[in-house]
């Protein structure tokens, strides 16, 4: 097979621009079958990003947290597990959990654009979840974002969304602590049960 000439250097300094995808375009790729459900992708700020695989500690935390969140909030909310959430025009992450008011989901023609609580279970994705995901969720005005930090065994709670820095408030809860979500202050959750 012939080799193509290298276009970098020697007077060629233009950079190629990658296409930024909108949520609608991304969804169209899925509708056409170009993107498959088994592909494990997310749309993050217009980029199609491959999600990292789950190891056993992460999978166990997702399993435990699913039970706890459904038990705690299912009377008024759906606990959407690893399903799309439209956040702005160019991001469609699939958070581990999005706790969404039932009225927002029922009868909707698109994926939800808001959630009362978004939760990511983080191990290999911790830096990404603290940076990119936090900025997306904060800029989208999502009131509360939890990171179940499997590495350090703590729950990171982010509140008071800000479009530039993600969130203005961050608190750490140890496994022996209890936490309440802003939208349901009457419900106390043992942090240890999320791991």
Image: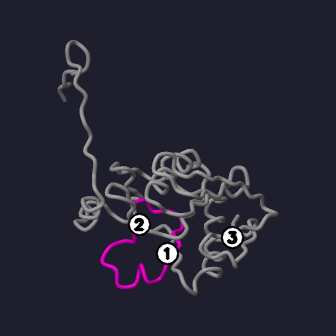
Per the rendering, the mark at residue 100 is 1
Depth check: give the residue in front, 132 or 57. 132
* Residue density around tag 2, few if under 14, some if 14–19, many if 20 or more, within 10 Å: many
Residue annotated with mark 2: 84
Q: Is residue 84 magenta?
A: no
State which tag comes first along the sequence, 1 or 2.
2
Question: Dot 3 lies on which element?
Answer: strand
Whole-percent x and y of residue 133?
49, 52
Mark 1 and mark 2: span between their CA atoms? 12 Å
Alpha-carbon neighbours of circle 3 within 10 Å: few (<14), some, or many (≥20)? some
> In the picture, which quadrant includes the N terminus?
top left
The quarter of the picture where residue 158 lies is bottom right
Tell me the crowding category of disc 1: few under 14, some 14 to 19, or many 20 or more residues within 10 angstroms, Cα based.
many
Q: Closer to the camera: disc 2 or disc 3?
A: 3
Spot the residue most to the bottom: 75
Separation of residues labelled 1 and 3 (CA atoms): 16 Å
Left or right, 166 with reference to 182 = left
Which residues, given as a range, are shown in magenta?
A: 92-113
Q: Residue at x 73, y 55 (%)?
A: 153
The percent coordinates of residue 165 (x first, y second) are 51, 46
Left or right of residue 166: residue 20: left
* Image quadrant where residue 117 sits: bottom right
- Name the N-terminal-most of marks 1 and 3: 1
Residue 22: percent from left, percent from top: 28, 56
Q: Inspect the magenta stretch and tell me whether residue 108 lies in it.
A: yes
First in sequence, mark 2 or 3: give its number.
2
Disc 3 target residue = 180
The answer to the question of whether label 1 and label 2 lie on touching residues, with beta carbons closer than 8 A, is: no
Residue placed at 52% from the left, 56% from the top?
161
Q: Distance between the residues labelled 2 and 3?
A: 24 Å
What's the residue at 25%, 28% (across, down)? 15
């Amino acid at each position: 097979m012939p080799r193509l000439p290298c276009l970098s250097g020697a007077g060629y300094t233009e950079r190629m621009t990658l296409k930024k995808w909108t949520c609608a375009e991304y969804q169209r790729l899925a509708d056409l079958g170009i993107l498959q459900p088994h592909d494990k992708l997310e749309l993050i700020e217009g980029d199609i990003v491959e999600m990292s695989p789950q190891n056993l500690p992460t999978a166990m935390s997702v399993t435990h947290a699913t039970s706890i969140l459904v038990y705690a909030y299912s009377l008024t909310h759906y606990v959407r597990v690893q399903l799309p959430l439209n956040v702005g025009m160019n991001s469609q992450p699939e958070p581990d959990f999005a706790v969404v008011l039932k009225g927002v989901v029922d009868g909707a023609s698109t994926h939800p654009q808001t959630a009362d609580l978004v939760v990511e279970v983080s191990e290999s994705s911790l830096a990404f979840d603290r940076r990119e995901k936090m900025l997306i969720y904060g800029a989208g005005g999502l009131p509360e974002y939890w990171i179940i930090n499997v590495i350090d065994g703590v729950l990171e709670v982010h509140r008071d969304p800000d479009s530039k820095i993600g969130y203005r408030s961050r608190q750490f809860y140890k496994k022996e602590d209890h936490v309440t979500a802003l939208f349901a202050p009457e419900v106390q959750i043992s942090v240890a049960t999320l791991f």
